[in-house]
Image (spheres, grey):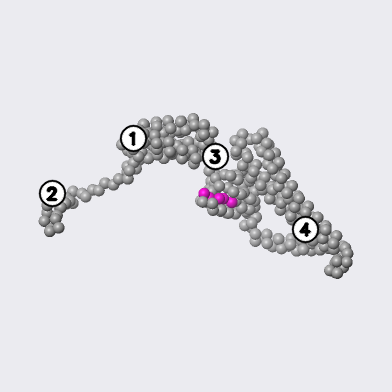
Amino acid sequence: MRYLHDLGLTAEHAFAAARALAILLAAVVAHMAAARAMDRVRRAMLAAMRRRARARNGELEKRAATLAGVIRKAAAAAIWLLAGLSIPKQFGFDLTPVLAGLSVGALAVGLGARTFIEDVISGAILLLENQIRVGDVCEVNGQRGAVAEVNLRTTVLRSGDGTVHVFPNGSIRRLANVTRGYSCFVLDLPVSRREDPDRAMALVCEEAAKLAGDPQFAPLILEPLEMLGVDQFTASAMIVRARLKTQPGQQVRVGRELNRRLKRRFDELGIRFPLPSRTLYFGEAADPLRAVRTQPNGRATGPTIGK
């Protein structure tokens, strides 16, 4: 007590500091407990979704993880807000006038904070309509990447090179979910126009069937290859188009393996891929080319081509 008296403090101050410290520790414990409870909440939501929905487990797990993450952040914000309001009261600070002033200020700010409100409402709609989940591959306003976070105000994408892109939810005007339900690998195979198209298409279907029978890739493929036929002709090639339905997000892995197998198979059978070519036409009025081989002294020694 002597030390408190020397510092100009009383026992009431010490008790107030102890109560504030207890509130702070309680907030820390509550935050940790809420973080652990979110795992149980996620499992409970996942079990409820499995009973009511017919979607695949992977889709349900992503939705449950996204919702649990939003709830965890909201719970953490509520815990620390309550702690921040309770601690000053322990030292005798009356926050009622401050809160009244903040409410008036918040009203004034809210009139000009339509963007923030729009972001929050748009984020809530994204979550309720299940348009996007953590782990999806999406294209937002022309930028593609994996969804790293879905918050009430922002959506965070991480592109293939590791760049993080943050989009306010109210600014999302175009959203394309590449991994919703299933994905498709679209094969556009250029083949020389001199080859038999039926033979080329049959080989593509054969290699796709072998790939679907591979134990490593069979779980990733949902349906047999859909052969769409010869899609178009270019100057030196015909484009054979096919489509393969895969598990969400696995179309790149399956497509790369199919491309590798097709390259090896075509090389074995001697089926040629097109090479760039260009035809030069000089017209009827153009003079023929004339080539003459000369010696250093200027005398022609070789055959002459043309006139």
Q: Which residue, given by chain and number where applicable, does mark 3 sit on?
A: 248
Q: Nearer the viewer, mark 2 or mark 4?
A: 2
Q: Camera-side residue: 286 or 18?
A: 18
Q: CA distance from mark 3 to mark 2?
A: 67 Å
Segment colored magenta: 156-160
Residue 301 coordinates in the image, percent (x, y): 12, 52
Q: Mark 1 is on which residue type?
A: Gly
Q: Camera-side residue: 180 or 194?
A: 194
- As helix, strand or loop, the secondary structure at mark 1 comes to loop
Q: Which residue, given by chain and number where applicable, does mark 1 sit on?
A: 270
- As helix, strand or loop, the secondary structure at mark 2 comes to loop
Q: Is residue 113 above or below residue 259?
A: below
Which quarter of the rendered picture does the N terminus lie within? bottom right
Q: Which residue, given by chain and number where applicable, does mark 2 sit on?
A: 303
Lower position in the chain sequence, tag 3 or tag 4: 4
* Total tally of numbered discs in the picture: 4
Please check the rendered image and state whether residue 290 is part of the magenta-colored stretch, yes or no: no
> Does the CB distance between marks 3 and 1 fall below 8 Å?
no
Residue 15 coordinates in the image, percent (x, y): 85, 60
- As helix, strand or loop, the secondary structure at mark 4 comes to helix
> Does the CB distance between marks 3 and 2 fall below 8 Å?
no
Q: Nearer the viewer, mark 4 or mark 1?
A: 1
Q: Mark 2 is on which residue type?
A: Pro
Residue 146 coordinates in the image, percent (x, y): 55, 47
Q: Which residue, given by chain and number where applicable, does mark 4 sit on?
A: 85
The crowding category of the residue bearing disc 1, from other C-alpha atoms within 10 Å (few below 14, some 14 to 19, many at least 20), is few
Lower position in the chain sequence, tag 3 or tag 1: 3
Q: Mark 4 is on which residue type?
A: Leu
> Does the CB distance between marks 2 and 4 fall below 8 Å?
no
